[in-house]
């Protein structure tokens, strides 16, 4: 990392490579809203570029050294993790003596002005950080935020507020969660993932410890998650959860549109109404409110504010309804996330839960395929499909059919779907789903790849 954060105290000219990605477009938004001159490039024109153009960001489609040469007095180039050293814009910038920084290296530039309130963990980061941004606004402060997905209730994935802090969805996948300074930090859970970056669980766990240990203000962990609870106990962090904790969920009641519960945050109890389904989202909300309490802010006002949050992009996201079938898309791509999404659907009262799961990355499938075996017990019918590579090269013997083997081998019938199907292509998935689905069912598309497209295909086919 850079010895000193990039200086944003005066107007700068910054070029963002792969500007259409979730993380890069959010950085570009904050820069443009902060009065800096921003340009960028991406391989394809995509919806995320429209809001940036409206902010005055100059965008070029395609990567070329000319994109750098044409920018007068360029101060910095920011690149996503996926952009390699051979990218012509990276090569051109370095040849011209312009600093090139990745996301982790650039984030401290924002933290110097607004120290981060960072939310990290293996699952639940986007939802919890979105709830936290909403709760802080309700509590009377005006934070900035930098999230991993658009949030309609907040107006987008990024916003430059006038308050003292910036809510950061702090990503452990590339180590950028260690960016700071951090005024407060919370850990939703700690499990093995992204080990191709970290080299092993011990290194990732040490990263989570550093994340909390190097935070200057309140630190918070989920007491219900063994990994985060163990780290929190070492560091004497505040806790939240369903079990014994400093901020405890009581009297949870689930319904089709969300949930209601009491949050015991001594010395008071706060009634919370949430428009996001599933007990996992109740836990996310409790974490966000617990952080507000740890920061000494108004929990009653914050509790009221989060009741307005709904419709997170690719987080139990209702795509539509046709033929009496509701179609929902969810980004879940790890075993615990899949289990939580299916449980939320089961508790919401549909006649049957029909799901398709698309494994994400060969490396992740190779590491976790056995753990997926017990993740689908709340589905009545499950369709498994081929792996979404996310830019990775295929690995010998690693295919989506490994999950068929894992699910089929589960000995307890209650922990596996009633019916299991294999359809290698998304077109085959859609046709199979239409044959299976009946009025009163919910159809879930699960995965971090392009499986969302299946939901739209099914809606069109059911409409016909």
Image (tube, helix red, strand yellow):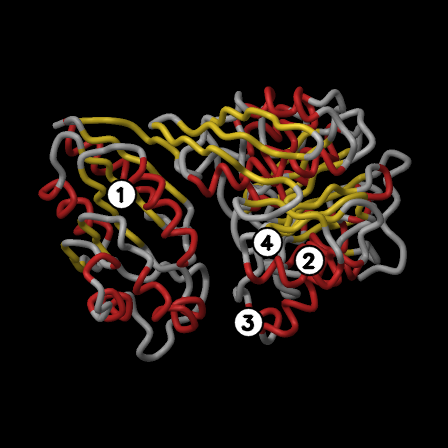
Cβ atoms at labels 2 and 1 below 8 Å apart: no
Q: 99 or 234: nearer the eye?
A: 234
Give the CA separation, mark 3 to mark 4: 17 Å
Judged from this view, the residue extending furthest toward the left is 435
Q: Residue at x 63, y 40 (%)?
A: 247
Q: Is residue 93 visible?
A: no
Question: Which of pointers 2 and 3 lies earlier in the amino acid sequence?
Answer: 3
Residue at label 3? Answer: 196
Residue under numbered circle 4: 121
Q: Nearer the viewer, mark 2 or mark 1?
A: 2
Residue at 71 percent of width and 31 percent of height: 267
Q: Earlier in the sequence, mark 3 or mark 4?
A: 4
Labels 1 and 4: the sequence-earlier one: 4
Name the residue tied to disc 2.
Answer: 232
Nearest the camera: 345 or 92? Answer: 345
Q: Residue at x 76, y 55 (%)?
A: 105
Question: Pointer 3: residues within 10 angstroms few (<14), some, or many (20+)?
Answer: few
In terms of sequence position, does the residue under pointer 1 or pointer 3 come before the other? 3
How far across and how far down the image is residue 168, in percent?
A: 68, 42
Could you say where residue 108 lies in the image, as x and y percent from the top left? 80, 49
Between tags 2 and 4, which lies in front? 2
């Amino acid at each position: 990392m850079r010895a000193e954060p990039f200086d944003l105290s005066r107007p700068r000219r910054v070029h963002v490579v792969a500007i259409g990605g979730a993380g890069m477009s959010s950085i570009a938004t904050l820069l443009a809203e902060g009065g800096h001159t921003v340009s960028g490039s991406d391989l394809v024109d995509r919806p995320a570029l429209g809001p940036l153009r409206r902010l005055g960001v100059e965008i070029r489609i395609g990567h070329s050294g000319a994109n750098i040469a044409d920018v007068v007095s360029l101060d910095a180039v920011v690149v996503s993790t996926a952009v390699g050293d051979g990218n012509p814009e990276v090569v051109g910038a370095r040849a011209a003596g312009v600093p090139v920084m990745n996301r982790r290296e650039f984030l401290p530039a924002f933290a110097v002005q607004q120290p981060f309130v960072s939310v990290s963990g293996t699952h639940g980061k986007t939802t919890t950080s979105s709830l936290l941004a909403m709760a802080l606004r309700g509590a009377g402060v005006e934070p900035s935020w930098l999230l991993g997905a658009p949030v309609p209730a907040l107006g987008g994935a990024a916003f430059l507020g006038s308050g003292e802090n910036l809510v950061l969805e702090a990503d452990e996948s590339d180590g950028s969660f260690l960016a700071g300074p951090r005024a407060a930090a919370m850990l939703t859970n700690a499990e093995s993932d992204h080990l191709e970056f970290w080299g092993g669980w011990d290194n990732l766990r040490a990263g989570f410890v550093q994340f909390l240990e190097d935070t200057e203000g309140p630190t918070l962990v989920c007491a219900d998650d063994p990994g985060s609870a163990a780290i929190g106990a070492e560091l004497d962090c505040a806790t939240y959860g369903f079990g014994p904790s400093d901020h405890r969920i009581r009297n949870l009641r689930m319904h089709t549109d969300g949930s209601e519960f009491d949050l015991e945050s001594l010395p008071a109890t706060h009634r919370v109404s949430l428009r996001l389904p599933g007990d996992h989202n109740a836990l996310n909300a409790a974490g966000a409110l617990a952080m507000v309490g740890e920061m000494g802010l108004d929990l009653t006002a914050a509790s009221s504010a989060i009741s307005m949050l709904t419709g997170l992009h690719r987080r139990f996201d209702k795509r539509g309804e046709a033929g009496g079938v509701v179609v929902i898309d969810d980004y879940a791509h790890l075993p615990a996330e899949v289990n939580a999404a299916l449980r939320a659907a089961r508790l919401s009262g549909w006649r049957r839960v029909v799901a398709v799961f698309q494994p994400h990355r060969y490396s992740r499938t190779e590491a976790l395929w056995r753990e997926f075996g017990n993740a689908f017990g709340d589905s009545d019918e499950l369709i498994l499909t081929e792996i979404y590579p996310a830019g990775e090269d295929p690995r010998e013997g690693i295919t989506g059919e490994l999950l068929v083997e894992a699910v089929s081998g589960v000995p307890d019938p209650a922990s596996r779907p009633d019916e299991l199907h294999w359809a290698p292509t998304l077109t085959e998935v859609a046709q199979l789903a239409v044959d299976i689905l009946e009025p009163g069912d919910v159809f879930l598309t699960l995965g971090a790849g392009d499986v969302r497209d299946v939901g739209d295909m099914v809606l069109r086919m059911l409409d016909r």
